[in-house]
């Protein structure tokens, strides 16, 4: 199969999948339960989520392994099942994705702060290496290091993935608006700083996820594109900022709202678009429709 | 003589823990909050004054800069580390009753949520403002909160959530705590939380950042 970067550099826009956490919750995951344990305990439910994104038109399907590093699994007493649970996560998404879609092994933050010496750089590298290798063994084509806020942690994760697997490596950080045209992660990293540091580390695709909704993503993408004219850009936005209504957390952005923001994102430089918290296959289906129409217009030269 | 207390405030503001600390680079080799606090005690400053005019003044500036996005989590963590390191010298006075804490504050991240950076920052800022902070950690079930409140009558409680998926657990915890302790003040905070959510679930105060939590607690402790 071709690589994601080859497709993107040839001018194709791609669609990534949407949320897993909120989908697992609606499938019955309780608070205090380990989401990654579902890869072993409820593989059919996990498969159904992956499959629903395949059917919605996503080209890139993630894995249920966001919190699958040994530090987070240790909280549930599951650190010694790290390899098994990640491998299972990749296998499930591989089965759902088939051979003509990419499986993106999800790697989230460790939850430990280097700055406060809660973990050593070596310890972090080793944990990310372990997770990355297990995801590749389970069938992941690429690895997405996501929702990062600390640049040093992101760098270690990218390095661990590049040096120990043959997967393409994507990395997204989560920025919030900190002023007029100014965005930073909670650790104070700007999109331009992310680009400068991570491109050096050999990352294949960069981007942004989670955050304050798809409207805010355009400004972030512009800053990434300004910092580097070539790096492929991935965007996975939340379905807006959640509101609480009648005992339920509700995400305000409808599939239509999100789909209507896609053209602006693409014009700003985004090439792969999906969703994060609160998005579901309906959001991805609508986004995929817009992406498909832009791809068609590109083919006949009606898109600049 | 006020100069000494300003030194403490300055070290806390810029995250200078002690003389050995290499951060911030421009203060390398100079004494930090740790040494200045010892000196102040030796020179006869009262623990109350050191707390008020040293620690609290420094942490207030940190909180203001953080709220204005002039500094971010790393700088704030270093300030908090400077403060907690120096605070150890004051502990004996609080234990003997010579100096008084403002009250007890119980804090934790709600059930199902493993994120604690924001909670830790808020806890440290509040401790720096003279509260006895009991940190219950992350993924804290409602019953643990209730048990702790029972042991510390008159305390206030802070609940944190980072995940949008755990906001509902925050609502459940507030509901249960308010039922058992109707007069209990509950503060809520975290990335997905906002003022509307706070009032919807019946909590008392939404802390957009640690600084506003400190101010709210100051107001209720004066009453």
Image: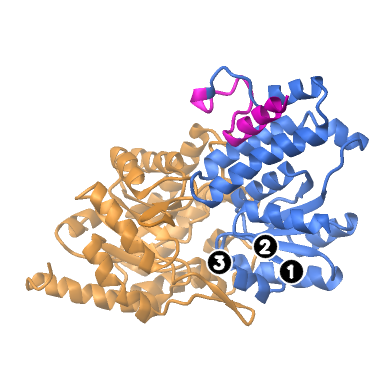
Chain colours: A orange, B blue
Asked whether, in this view, residue A180 is left or right of residue B143, the answer is left
The answer to if A266 sits in the magenta stretch is: no
Q: Chain of mark 3?
A: B
The answer to whether mark 2 and mark 1 are in CB contact below 8 A is: yes
Q: Which residues are magenta?
A: B1-26
Q: Is disc 1 surrounded by few (<14), some (14 to 19) or many (20+) residues within 10 Å? A: many
Q: Nearer the viewer, residue A288 or B170?
A: B170
In terms of secondary structure, where does tag 3 sit?
A: helix
Q: Which residue is mark 3?
A: B164
Asked whether, in this view, residue A300 is left or right of residue B86, the answer is left
User: Depth-wise, is mark 2 or mark 3 nearer the camera?
Assistant: 2
User: Depth-wise, is mark 2 or mark 1 nearer the camera?
Assistant: 2
Q: Position of residue B167 (x, y in %)?
A: 62, 68
In terms of secondary structure, where does tag 2 sit?
A: strand
Q: Is disc 3 surrounded by few (<14), some (14 to 19) or many (20+) residues within 10 Å? A: many
Q: Chain of mark 1?
A: B
Q: Position of residue B152 (x, y in %)?
A: 88, 54
User: Depth-wise, is mark 3 or mark 1 nearer the camera?
Assistant: 1
Q: Nearer the viewer, residue A241 or A30?
A: A241
| Residue B182 appears in the figure | yes
Q: Which residue is mark 1?
A: B174
- Farthest top residue in view: B29
Q: Earlier in the sequence, mark 2 or mark 1?
A: 1
Q: Which residue is mark 2?
A: B188
Q: Please determine if labels 3 and 1 lie on a single subunit.
A: yes
């Amino acid at each position: 199969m071709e690589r994601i970067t080859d497709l993107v550099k040839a001018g194709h826009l791609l669609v990534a999948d949407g949320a897993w956490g909120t989908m697992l919750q609606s499938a019955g995951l309780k608070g205090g339960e380990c989401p990654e344990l579902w890869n072993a305990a409820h593989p059919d439910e996990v498969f159904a989520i992956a499959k629903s994104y395949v059917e919605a038109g996503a080209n890139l399907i993630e894995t249920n392994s966001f919190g699958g590093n040994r530090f987070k699994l240790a909280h549930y007493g599951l650190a010694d099942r790290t390899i098994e649970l990640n491998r299972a996560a990749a296998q499930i998404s591989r089965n759902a994705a088939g051979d003509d879609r990419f499986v993106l092994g999800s790697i989230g933050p460790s939850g430990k702060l280097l700055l406060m010496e809660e973990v050593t750089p070596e310890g972090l590298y080793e944990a990310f290496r372990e997770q990355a290798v297990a995801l590749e063994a389970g069938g992941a084509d690429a690895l997405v290091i996501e929702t990062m806020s600390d640049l040093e942690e992101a760098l270690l994760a990218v390095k661990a993935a590049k040096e120990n697997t043959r997967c393409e490596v994507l990395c997204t950080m989560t920025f919030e608006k900190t002023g007029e045209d100014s965005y930073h992660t909670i650790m104070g990293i700007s999109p331009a700083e992310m680009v400068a540091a991570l491109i050096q580390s050999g990352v294949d695709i960069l981007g942004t996820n989670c955050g304050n909704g798809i409207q805010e993503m355009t400004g972030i993408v512009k800053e990434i594109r300004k910092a580097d004219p070539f790096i492929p850009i991935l965007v996975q936005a939340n379905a807006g900022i959640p509101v609480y209504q009648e005992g339920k957390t509700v995400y305000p952005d409808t599939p239509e709202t999100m789909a209507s923001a896609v053209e602006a994102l693409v014009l700003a430089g985004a090439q792969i678009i999906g969703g994060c918290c609160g998005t579901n296959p309906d959001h991805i289906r609508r986004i995929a429709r817009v992406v498909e129409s832009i791809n068609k217009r590109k083919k006949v030269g009606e898109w600049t | 003589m006020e100069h000494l207390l300003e030194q403490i405030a300055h070290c806390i503001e810029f995250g200078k823990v002690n003389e050995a600390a290499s951060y911030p680079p421009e203060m390398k080799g100079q004494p930090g909050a740790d040494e200045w606090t010892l000196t102040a005690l030796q020179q006869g400053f009262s623990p109350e004054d050191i707390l008020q005019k040293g620690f609290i003044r420094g942490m207030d500036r940190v909180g203001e800069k953080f709220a204005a996005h002039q500094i971010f989590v790393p700088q704030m963590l270093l300030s908090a580390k400077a403060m907690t390191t120096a605070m150890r010298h004051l502990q004996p006075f609080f234990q003997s009753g010579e100096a008084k804490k403002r009250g007890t504050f119980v804090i934790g991240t709600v059930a199902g949520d493993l994120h604690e950076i924001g909670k830790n920052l808020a806890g440290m800022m509040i401790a720096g403002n003279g509260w006895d902070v009991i940190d219950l950690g992350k993924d804290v079930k409602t019953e643990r909160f209730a048990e702790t409140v029972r042991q510390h009558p008159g305390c206030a409680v802070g609940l944190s959530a980072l995940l949008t998926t755990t906001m509902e657990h925050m609502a459940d915890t507030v509901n249960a705590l308010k039922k058992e302790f109707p007069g209990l003040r509950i503060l809520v905070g975290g990335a997905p939380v906002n003022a509307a959510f706070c009032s919807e679930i019946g909590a008392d105060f939404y802390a957009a950042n640690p600084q506003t939590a400190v101010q709210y607690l100051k107001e209720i402790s004066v009453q």
